[in-house]
């Protein structure tokens, strides 16, 4: 028997709203709209601005919420590895 994940609980830990300013609430609304689009999303911003919280909220609100969420720190990758991680590569493209 396959266990179904529970989405009825709190959003705590997955981007629960931490502010009530007009700008912040507008951002939360945009996240909700973007979550309905079945496309990859790249979040950029300064360190400590909540990119991972935003990614978790996007994932939770998306149709793929039951699938794993993979967070990737692109600054830790070389340009060639980043391209491969983001866009994939053909079998045999790397040697070694």
Image (cartoon, rainbow, N blue to C red):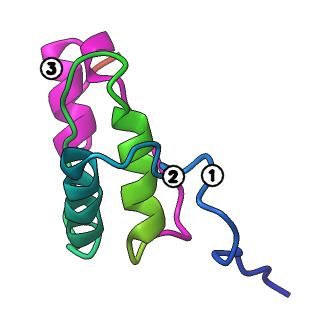
**Which quarter of the picture shows residue 19?**
top left
Magenta residues (range):
65-94
User: Residue reaching furthest right?
Assistant: 1
| On-image quarter of the N terminus | bottom right
State how far apart marks 3 and 1 are (Cα).
36 Å
Q: Nearer the viewer, mark 3 or mark 1?
A: 1
Residue bearing mark 1: 12
Where is residue 89 shown, x and y percent of the image?
20, 41
Where is residue 63 shown, x and y percent of the image?
40, 78
- In the visual, does 50 lie left or right of 81? right
Q: Residue at x 28, y 55 (%)?
A: 25
In the rendered image, residue 77 lying in the magenta stretch gets the answer: yes
- In the visual, does 48 lie left or right of 7? left
Q: Earlier in the sequence, mark 3 or mark 2?
A: 2
Q: Are marks 1 and 2 in contact (CB under 8 Å)?
A: yes
Residue bearing mark 2: 16
Q: Residues within 10 Å of mark 1 (few under 14, many from 20)?
A: few
Mark linked to residue 80: 3
Q: Nearer the viewer, residue 86 or 48?
A: 48
SS for callout 2: loop
**Which quarter of the picture shows residue 43?**
top left
Q: Is residue 78 visible?
A: yes
Where is residue 64 shown, x and y percent of the image?
43, 71
Q: Are marks 3 and 2 in contact (CB under 8 Å)?
A: no
Q: Residues within 10 Å of mark 2 (few under 14, many from 20)?
A: some
Q: Nearer the viewer, residue 15 or 75?
A: 15
* Magenta span main SS: loop
User: Residue reaching furthest bottom?
Assistant: 1
């Amino acid at each position: 028997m396959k266990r179904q994940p529970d989405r009825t609980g709190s959003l705590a830990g997955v981007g629960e709203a931490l502010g009530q300013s007009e700008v912040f609430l507008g951002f939360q609304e945009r996240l909700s709209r973007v979550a309905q689009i079945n496309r990859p999303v790249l979040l950029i911003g300064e360190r400590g601005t909540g990119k991972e919280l935003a990614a978790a909220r996007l994932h939770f609100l998306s149709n793929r919420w039951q699938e794993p969420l993979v967070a990737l720190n692109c600054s830790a990758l070389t340009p060639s590895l980043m391209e491969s991680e983001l866009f994939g590569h053909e079998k045999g493209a790397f040697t070694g």
